[in-house]
Image (cartoon, rainbow, N blue to C red):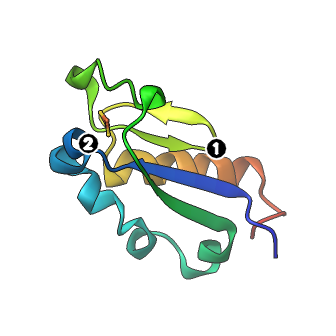
Amino acid sequence: MQTQITVEIFCGLPCYMLGNSRILNIGAHLPETWLPHISLLASPCNPACKCADLTHAPYARVNGKMIANATVESVCEEIRRIVKEKEGILI
Ligand code: FES
């Protein structure tokens, strides 16, 4: 089965300390049947993470879309939006 949603959780010290440690467990907040379609990556701090702009950390990225002030809820919401958009493929 092909992975269709890539979730990157930035785990440089700022994002990790500001809440991304909790997002790493996002699978516990999603329907089990979706999990084979989700690739969860713990990414190092990098320019795409906007390290210079910590006012909106922590950051996560879902299928290329950067999410500032990331929370379990906001990342789940973006995943649900994608699943809904691709309904019939994932479900
Ligand atoms: S990990 Fe570098 S600011 Fe997010």
Label 1 lies in ligand 1 vicinity (Cβ under 8 Å): no
On the rendered structure, is 47 left or right of 23? right
Q: Which mark is residue 63?
A: 1
Label 2 lies in ligand 1 vicinity (Cβ under 8 Å): yes
Residue type, mark 1 in image: Asn
Quick one: SS at disc 1?
loop
Residue 42 rendering spot, x and y as whole percentages: 43, 57
Identify the residue shown where x is 83% and y is 63%.
88
On the rendered structure, is 88 left or right of 53? right
Residue 24 rendering spot, x and y as whole percentages: 36, 63
Task: Tell which tag, 1 or 2, sits nearer the viewer.
Answer: 2
Question: Which is nearer the eye, 28 or 8?
Answer: 8
Residue 50 rendering spot, x and y as whole percentages: 38, 24
Q: Quadrant of the C terminus?
A: bottom right
Residue type, mark 2 in image: Cys
Residue 85 rendering spot, x and y as whole percentages: 74, 47
Sequence-wise, the earlier of marks 1 and 2 is 2
Query: Local crowd at mark 1 within 10 Å, few (<14), some, or many (≥20)?
Result: some
Identify the residue shown where x is 66% and y is 56%.
5
Question: Which is nearer the eye, 70 or 49?
Answer: 49
Quick one: SS at disc 2?
helix
On the rendered structure, is 61 left or right of 69? right
* Extreme-left residue of the structure: 17
Q: Quadrant of ligand 1?
A: top left
Give me the C-alpha separation between circle 1 and circle 2.
19 Å
Q: Which mark is residue 5?
A: none
Identify the residue shown where x is 55% and y is 81%.
32
Name the residue carrying label 2.
Answer: 15
Q: Quadrant of the N terminus?
A: bottom right
